Each structure stands twice: as structure tokens, then as C-alpha cells.
Amino acid sequence: DARTPDTNPPERTRSTVSHHTRTGTVPWPDDVAAHYRSRGYWEDRTLGELLWEVADARPTQDAVVDGDVRLTYAELTARADAAAGRLRELGLEPDDRLLVQMPNGWEFIVLTLACFRAGVIPVMALPAHRRHELTHLASLSEARAVAVPRVLRDFDHERLAHELAAELPDLEHVLALGEAGELDPRSVPLAEVLAPGEDRASERAAADAMRPDPDSPACFLISGGTTGLPKLITRTHNDYACNLRATSATAGLTERDVYLGTLPASHNFPLACPGVLGTLLVGGRVVMLPSPSPVRAFATIEREGVTIAAAVPAVAQRWIEHQEEVGGTQTRTLRVLQVGGSRLPDEHAAKVEPVLGARLQQVFGMAEGLINTTRLDDPADVIVGTQGRPVHEADEVRILDPFGDDVPDGEPGAIYTRGPYTPRGYYNAPEHNERAFLPGGWYGSGDVVVRRTDGNLIVHGRDKDMVNRGGEKISAEEIEGLMYRLGDIKIAAAVSMPDPVLGERLCVYAVVKPGHRAPTLEDVREVFARAEVAGFKYPDRLEIVDQLPMTKVGKIDKRILREDIADRLQERREENA
Ligand code: OOB
């Protein structure tokens, strides 16, 4: 399955005709869609249909485990069908959006499957999001309902959800985890929405009758975002099923597998690469865990016989260190550890198999589509030293120089892609789409990669104004915008700084207005707290400077800033040594 020639299928121009009636989504051109259908990449079946077929073949087998809760396939699908009916009773129609901000648990899965069945579109917010992000996501998606935990890690999600509902006219319903007695009386208790039904046959028939169009969005994912607030990525049933099949194949996933869902499940990686949904689609078992701390994760791996897990590099590193300390055998059953979301340093990659006993699979993917993985039977130098190659035979990848010419193998360039699970545009963002997509529908992720002659990609760096803080993506522009809420700032520039644990952290350079007081990092963090921004976006360091370096075209030269902060950190380490 080496790389596909870039010319196949041939260059196509963006189609303006569409059989989609929904505004805001950008369909694949009709001829490309026909090609994907004829090759069987798109099966025209909904995720619900595909999953229910698998469930019907193994009704008594465990599908989902969450602490003491175990749901068989029959229980899972029965609850989801009953929940689909209840969403409809609440007034949620096909194509309505439900903003989902739920911790990893069985409830997340049942609710997501209920949405797939009812044609309600879950908008996959992150648990760390706060008012700043949720307001944006709810209004951009015109969400009619939001599903939240009650209080989680000392934060009252339910209260915030009601505040949003009061401000946003579309947002009518707050669904909250818990029972009627413990919730705000205005909340719809998720305990009731997700409870078993009463009449399996009729609930199933009712849900069957709600079947959405396989070309309609199954869910909205959140982009990492380089321009201010995140964009929404529409993933259709057809494209997401294709994504699930291809990533399951490269992970060697079968019904004997037990997947540990420990990264926040609303991320594409743990949701669908192959993740929670891919595991269910092959008839395996999903074990949900709300946090990846090694003590609990290892105990769970041992108890449930987990065979495959996904981690960001920072988590993989913690697991390796923990194993080296305790020297245990708790990860004995682990067959594959997938690592992705940010660059895994080669020296950490080399330790995964010797220390954890699991084959490493590097995953270089994006919520926008394209997934690259190393293959389980690749030679060690590929597994340790590359981020793999596209998972699907129809994935097209081009690596271009700044003039738009293809670079030869071995030389760095910007990656562009299209394929059967890489959508042709963000939701309702025509202007941004002009910049993020080349004519012909090629999506540019902003990553700088080197393609080896064997087709494997090495992520070399980035040409996008984003900070990748332990796998969480932060838009520099968004941070800079927030910085101006400090009235004393004349100009601000957010850049990444190297960090031994997270890979990168967030550093902000700022020039103070003449005659104004220089703010401290605490002042900055207070402003972010008042703006109610997700915690991972708070700057880790503030550098007050007299002026910022500029490029010839008059933009802030962030390369110089990144070098400057790396030097300063290096000097400090040497002083401390
Ligand atoms: C995953 O998805 P997103 O949408 O949160 O972030 C995508 C970006 C990529 O464009 C790249 O900049 C970075 O995250 N990235 C990596 C990487 N995996 C992702 N950079 C270096 N090495 C890697 N292995 O992060 C994502 C989605 C699906 C599967 C895996 C990761």
C-alpha cells in the first residue's frame, strides 16, 4: 500500500453544483464522489447501520466498560435507540446540532450513537473548553442543545450551560449528567435520556425510520485552528466510516481487541482512528477512562486485558517512566500503543516496545481528515523514526515548496492532501476555505514534512501560526487577540517554546504601550481567567520586550522569537546546572 500517485484521480476543479441542500458544507465534486462510490470507499451506509449490524451479531458480548458499568452490544444499541427517540421527543430534528461536552464515559458513547441514529449532529467540544470556546461553537453550529457533566474538576459545567442558553436564542435544551433530583430543574437529566427503553422492538423501528442520509454530517469535529477561534469540520457518515475502516486495518483491529479510551474521546484520534468507534465497528470492547494517569490506566489495562490504547507523546512518556519505576507486568496484554497528536521524539519512540511490551504505532493525523500511521510490521527504523504513511489507498498527498511546486523525496515541504475522508471545506467558512484549500480541493494542514523514498513521512516542523501544547492545539492569533484585553499591551506575539514534557508550551512576547506598566504573567493569566478561556490556552511565560523583530514584508518574525526563547531557556538551564 505504498503512496498513491498524485495524479490519480486527475486534477479536478472545484464543483459548484451540489446535491446537498444544506448550506455551509462543501461537498466533494460529483465525479470524485462517484469514483469513491464505485471503488467501495463510500458504502452509502450510516454509522448507525454499520454498528447495529455488528451489534446484532454479538448481542451478549461486552461493548462498553466504564468502571462498574458494563454494556453488552444489545444493551448499547437498545439504549441508543431509546435515547434517539427521546432526543426526537425533546424536539431535536434531523440536522439539528447538539453541542457535546462530556467526559470519557459510557454516556458519551450512548449519546453519540443516539445522534447517529436520529440524524442529530453532535458537535464534539473538548472537556477543557469554557465559555469563550463554547459560546463560539454553539453559535457557529447553531446548536439547539448542549450536553454537559454537572460539576467536573471543580467546574460547574451545568451552570455555564444555562448561562449560554440564556444568551443564545437557538440553544433551547441543557442535557446534564445526573438524575432529576440533583440537577438544576431546567436541565434535562441525561440519566433519563440514556436510560433503557421500554419497548425494544418499537424503539428500534422508530430509530430505523430516522435514518439520515449517509452523505450528511455524522458529527462536527473541532479544528486545531490557526486563525482565531476554531472552525467546524463536517464529517459525513460515508467519509467517517471510510476513516474507521482504514485506520482499523492499519491497527490490525479485530473483535478480540480491547481499546482503552483515555484521551478525551471528542478528539478525532481516540474517537475514530480507530478509537472508540472503530473498535465497536469490528465488534471489540471499549474501556473508557476519564484520565490517562499511569496508575489507573495500568490497573485498567491489567483488569480488562486491554490490547490497544492511544496516547499523545506526553502521556506515552509518563507511561514509560512509570513502567521503568515500578517494573511491573501490568501492560502485558497491550499489543499496540498508538502515539500521535504531536511529534514523538525518536528517543522516546525507541523505548515504547522494550519498556511497555507493545508495538508502537505512530499516528500523524488531523481532524480535517488525512491519517498517516506506521504499520505494525514495518522495520524498526520506520516505526521509531517516521510518522508513517496514509492509511487509505485513495489518499493523495503532495509536498510543495513555497511556489507550489512538488519537492523531491527527502526534502521538506508543505503537505497538501485530499481523499475519501478529507472534507473539501470547513463548515460555513467560505473565506477561510479559500486560504486553507488549493484549487482542486487540496487541504493544506500547515505541516512541513519530508517524504522518504519508501513513502513514509517525517514531520519536520510547521508553517502555521499554532502552538501544539502536548497535543492540544492553540491558535497564536486567538491568544494575541486575548492579550489586547490587557489595556497596557501595544503589540503581542504568541509562539511555542520547547518543553521537555509537553513538547511545546505557550510563550507570549509583548511590547508595552509608552507610559504604561508592564503586566506580569499573573496579570495575563487573570485576564484569560476573566475571559473564561480553556485552561490549556493560558500562557506559560511572558517576555516583555522593547520591540518585536519584523520580517521584510513587515510581519512579526516569529522564527526569531522562537529561537530567542529557546536560547533563554537553554541559558537558564545552564545557570541552574
Ligand atoms: C490530531 O488532530 P488535530 O486536528 O488535533 O491536529 C492536527 C495537527 C497536525 O496538522 C499536526 O500539526 C499535528 O496535529 N500532529 C502531529 C502528529 N499528529 C498530529 N505532529 C507531529 N507528529 C504527529 N504524529 O492531532 C490527530 C488526529 C487524528 C489522529 C492523530 C492525531
Image (tube, rainbow, N blue to C red):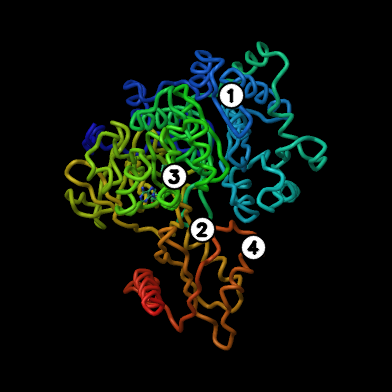
Residue under the point 45% across and 55% down? 470
Task: Tell me what residue is drawn at x 63 percent, y 33 percent.
Answer: 107
Q: Is residue 400 visible?
A: yes
Quadrant containing the N terminus in the rendered view: top left
Tell me where residue 517 appears, x and y as whole percent.
59, 84
Mark 3 or 1, closer to the camera: 3
Name the residue that disc number 2 marks: 228
Position of the C terminus by quadrant: bottom left
Q: Please, which residue is most extreme toward the bottom here? A: 515
Numbered circle sitting on residue 531:
4
Question: Looking at numbered disc 2 in the image, what kind of residue is underneath it?
Answer: Gly
The number of numbered discs placed on residues in the rendered structure image is 4
Marks 3 & 4, CB-CB < 8 Å contact: no
Residue type (three-letter) at the residue carrying disc 3: Ala
Q: If you read the primary sequence from the N terminus, does the residue marked by circle 2 or circle 4 appear first?
A: 2
Give x and y (percent) for residue 281: 46, 24
State the residue position of label 1: 117
Sooner in the amino-acid sequence: mark 2 or mark 3: 2
Q: Determine which residue is flagged by label 3.
A: 311
Q: CA distance from mark 4 to mark 1?
A: 37 Å
Q: Judging from the image, what secondary structure is the residue with disc 2 in?
A: loop
Question: Dot 3, crowdedness within 10 Å: few (<14), some or many (≥20)?
Answer: many
Res. 424 image quadrant? top left
Location of residue 170 with respect to 556 vertically, above or below: above
